[in-house]
Amino acid sequence: MKEKLAINGGPKAVNKEFLWPIFDAGDVNAVTRIAQSGKWGNPDCGDEVAKFEEEFAAYCGAKYAITCVNGSVSLRLALIACDVKPGDEVIVPPYTFITTASSVIECNCVPVFVDIDPNTYNISPAAIEAAITERTKAIIPVHFGGLACDMDAIMDIARKHGLRVIEDAAHGHGAEYKGKKLGSIGDVGSFSFQSSKNLTSGEGGIVITNDDELYAMMRSLRNVGRIEGGQWYDHYNPGCNYRITQIQAVLLSQQLKRLEAQTRKRNDNGLYLNHLLSKVKGISPLSRNEAITLHCYHIYIFKYDPAAFGGLSRNDFAAMLTAEGVPSFKGYPHPLYKQPLFQNKNFMCYAIPDHVDYTQVYCPNAEQACSSDAVWILQHALLGEKEDMEAFVNAILKIQTSQL
Ligand SMILES: *Cc1c(COP(=O)(O)O)cnc(C)c1O
């Protein structure tokens, strides 16, 4: 029987609010304690910040962690510490948030876009290898949606060519590759604590590393170029004030206590959705293999085939799914190189050679994900119960039935 779609005024298939962030009196009391102490910030961030950095580094199995104002600046800290020079090339995927690539521009370097694997939406190692030139300095793999990149292959390529690897793990808090926490495998791992992310303090970011020199440099850059043991008004490195407040740090310490259980819950619900959706014609979840020991599903992604939905476009399908009460989205409208920023080379950066022309870049897999294939279900929805996952699938089936 055809039911009236919610987008046309019918009843929703899913009648539940999925909240984010999740917090309780413990979080509120922690913030209140800092507010009342008056120790909101500190020239060197303060003890609550240092405490959270230790906790996060330990959680990730890394030696060091350095907080900063967001998950875009964290990429900048990593790039500068990795000693990129004007005109150096940095390999990035085109299916990601803008700052994965614009942080490269901010460092006067050239982002080189290479395509994603259509089965995982992660950067393709073969495409990385094909894009390496003598100017290549670093690779920024993005663990898209929280699904680990093929890190063995990427680290092999990086070692072979002497490149730095900066993991953009802004979607990857708590997720694992072969038992290792994302961010702990490359030279630096970068995370965001922006409000939508799987660990949040409203805004914020962090870098993790095992390397003493990268650690010292990123700490210096975060603190206006000051160095350990240096004088207050002596500045050595091209940094800025990228420090977070103690209030953010206590919130993050509280939130971190929930991260592992939340990650496991999303992982289990994602596997259950994979199972349920394997029976739905026209819906193909991205593939995950045995290297993915834990997926944090910052985004649960499936590929949509209009042929199984009477020709209904992906954009119309995604709008209907959202109206049915599934926290979902069609995702990025175009690959990053199609952004006006890149098409027009509207950079305050004079080191990008004239021959670099983003109008000539074309990554077919990223194009297809953006224009017609990808549908995203957002992380907080994966914190629901098994029956909620079943309700999401029923919403998809309701739309399918209405079109046939
Ligand atoms: C969110 C995000 C960032 C940037 O983080 P902010 O904290 O918002 O600056 C970087 N990379 C990816 C992949 C992201 O999703």
Image (spheres, grey):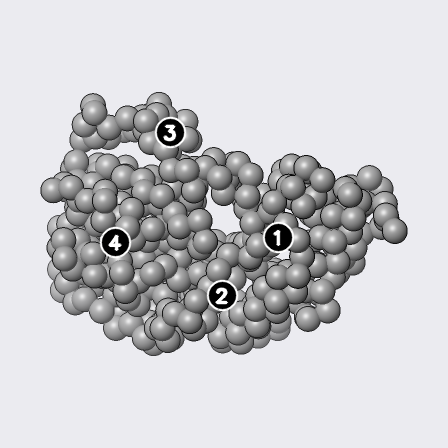
- Cα distance between the residues tagged 3 and 1: 33 Å
Say what secondary structure mark 3 lies in: helix
Name the residue at 29% across, 53% down.
125
Provide residue 13's location: percent of width, then percent of height: 79, 55
As drawn, 19 above or below 310 = below
Q: Nearer the viewer, mark 3 or mark 1?
A: 1
Say which quarter of the image contains residue 15: bottom right
> Looking at the picture, which amino acid does disc 2 mark?
Cys
- Cα distance between the residues tagged 3 and 4: 22 Å
Please name the residue that numbered disc 1 is placed on. Answer: 283
Instruction: Identify the mark nearer the N-term, 4 or 1.
Output: 4
> Looking at the picture, which amino acid does disc 1 mark?
Ile
Q: Is residue 185 visible?
A: yes
- Cα distance between the residues tagged 4 and 1: 38 Å
Disc number placed over residue 341 in the picture, else none: 3
Name the residue at 74% across, 61% down.
391
Disc number placed over residue 296 in the picture, else none: 2
127 left or right, relative to 1: left
In front of the other: 219 or 330: 330
Q: Nearer the viewer, mark 2 or mark 3?
A: 2
In front of the other: 216 or 131: 131
Instruction: Identify the mark nearer the N-term, 4 or 2.
Output: 4
Provide residue 310's location: percent of width, then percent of height: 71, 40
Name the residue at 51% across, 56% down.
286
Say which quarter of the image contains residue 174: bottom left
Disc number placed over residue 78 in the picture, else none: 4
Instruction: Identify the mark nearer the N-term, 3 or 1.
Output: 1
In front of the other: 295 or 106: 295
Q: Count neighbours of disc 3 (C-alpha within 10 A) and say few if under 14, some if 14 to 19, many if 20 or more.
A: some
